[in-house]
Amino acid sequence: MKKIKLSLLRGVCQMPAYVACEKGFMKDEGLDAQIEIVATAWLVPQKLSAGDCQFAVMPWTRVAAAELEGLPLVLLAGSGFEEAAIVLRHGVAPSEVKKVSVPLRGGIKDLTAMGLIRSLGWENAAQIRQPSGDGAIIALFGQGADAASMVEPYATMMEELGVGRVIRRTGDLWKGAPGCSLATTKPLTQSDPSLVEAVVRAFARGVKFVRENHAESSEIASRYIGINSRFIRAALKNNQPNVDAIRNQKPMDDILALMQQLGYIKTIPTQYRDLRFLDKVSTMK
């Protein structure tokens, strides 16, 4: 068994990786995969580039931006799909929003919020920046914000608990936009392509399993995400992983253009995807 480490976050977008490890899909590929749950997404690029992990499921926008910072990261397969949502606190009308809670700049939760603020008429609302997605959720739950941007299953959980309601999703702005995606380093794709292909194959099986087996997948994910599996099952009715999401060029181009407009990046990156492995796995279905 070849040992690998995966840096993961918490959410529906991470479920294919949880499942691939727990259901033995990684072992079927001769891999002994160890999962590390990272506190926040902005830590992951450095972990990958430093060799602390070999693979990660992380915001694709951070992979793209890493190219401009000299970090040799690359996307391999999609997972998150139209994954962020704007949740409005219960009892607050859209026209009454004065504070919006969003995580640090550069992820899809932040970008969805930035893209939707104008259409929602919230240009004058104060933006409460939090160091992580958890912070944005807590700000909404603790009534320190009128609205917040978050991913699933937390958006559905907020609805189920009566804390708030989803009023917009990423797909309302960018149809087909990917979210957190499977990534690695460019040197690894060159030095050990068979390993990369094996991980992509196991991950793709994980995506398929999640889409077809909501109950069992939710039970597995609950142990990593830390919330009741019923919220995760409910979230899967609204949002499911999509292995081909990173093929959707138009929404990705639109998001990168917004990042440039906001000053997050100076130029548009172009070498942040390697679809060879996903293409090969897709032809074997």
Image: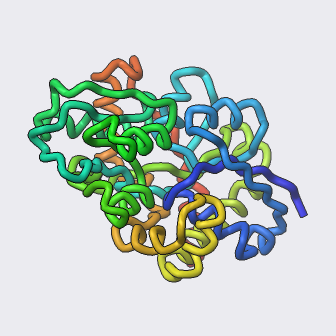
Q: Quadrant of the N terminus?
A: bottom right
Residue 55: image x %, image y %? 69, 48
Which residue, as the protein is rendered here, is positioned at the far right? Answer: 1
Q: Is residue 201 visible?
A: no
Q: How many labels were placed on the picture?
A: 0
Q: Residue at x 39, y 17 (%)?
A: 266
From the top left corner, tell me how far across and down residue 221 is, in percent. Answer: 60, 66
The quadrant in which residue 200 appears is: bottom right
To which quarter of the image does residue 281 belong? bottom right
* 102 relative to 207 in the view: left or right: left
Indicate whether 189 appears above or below 46.
below
In the picture, measured across the screen, residue 264 lies left or right of residue 224, that is left
Q: Quadrant of the C terminus?
A: bottom right
Q: In this orientation, which residue lies closer to the viewer: 157 or 121? A: 157
Rendered image quadrant of residue 58:
top right
Q: Quick check: 171 above or below 19?
A: above
- Looking at the picture, the colour scheme in use is rainbow
| Residue at x 74% of width, y 54% of height | 35
Q: Is residue 20 above or below residue 171?
A: below
Q: Position of residue 136 (x, y in %)?
A: 41, 39
Residue 33 appears left or right of 266: right
Q: Is residue 100 visible?
A: yes
Left or right: 259 as drawn, with respect to 32: left
Q: Residue at x 75, y 67 (%)?
A: 26
Q: Position of residue 235 (x, y in %)?
A: 40, 67
The residue located at (53%, 72%) in the rendering is 229
Closer to the camera in the image, 194 or 95: 95
